[in-house]
Image: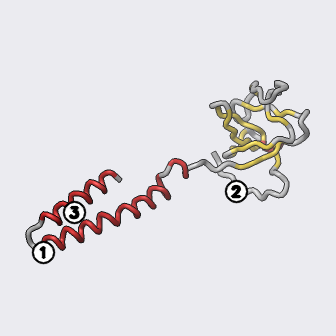
Amino acid sequence: MGAVLAGLGICIDHAVMAAQSDEQVHWWRLSLAVALVLPVGSFVYHQWFDPSEQTPQTYQFVVNGSDVDVIPLYGEAGGKPQTLATGEAGQNGLIGGETYSFDCWVEVGKDQRVWLRYHRFGGVWWAPRDQLHPPAGVRQSEMPRC
């Protein structure tokens, strides 16, 4: 935006200082073209490059069971359960009946068990898909593979 404003200033300055009318017309036309870059550039930036618009897609899933049921999280899909305190009672995993956001899935092992990726506390965790279900009344769109 700064470059466009500087270019616009230069074009207007040349248009005002031009001695001949043909040269003035040329610089005024160029000024108009440069001025039109501002709204077009602003639109393009907000559609394609604005970081606030680039939020990753997440998918909501509810943990099977009630609040006394806890499924452990895994440091890697198909690996060993990891300890991660997620509640006031010190549960180490995802609490039953609660909704969590996941971003993608993988298949691991001979049985091709599906695992969902979960981000929390600056780390990446994995939860088995067979212990989760979509929220009632919510139609899930196609979740991407990791």
- Up-down: is 101 above or below 10? above
Callout 2 secondary element: loop
- Per the image, the residue denoted by label 3 is 12
- Given contact means CB atoms under 8 Å apart, are the residues at marks 3 and 2 in contact? no
- Per the image, the residue denoted by label 1 is 21
Q: How crowded is mark 3: few (under 14 residues within 10 Å), some or many (20 or more)?
A: some
Callout 3 secondary element: helix
Q: Earlier in the sequence, mark 1 or mark 2?
A: 1
Could you tell whether 11 is left or right of 3 in the image? left
Callout 1 secondary element: helix
- Per the image, the residue denoted by label 2 is 142
| Quadrant location, the C terminus | top right
Residue in the picture at 73% in, 34% down:
78
- Given contact means CB atoms under 8 Å apart, are the residues at marks 1 and 2 in contact? no
State the separation of the CA atoms marked 3 and 1: 14 Å
Q: Which of 38 and 15 is in front in this view?
A: 15
Amino acid at the residue labelled 2 = Glu
Q: Which of marks 3 and 2 is nearer the N terminus?
A: 3
Q: Which residue, as the protein is rendered here, is positioned at the far front? A: 16
Amino acid at the residue labelled 3 = Ile
Residue in the picture at 69% in, 52% down:
143
Task: Identify the mark at residue 47; answer none if there is no mark.
Answer: none
State the separation of the CA atoms marked 1 and 2: 61 Å
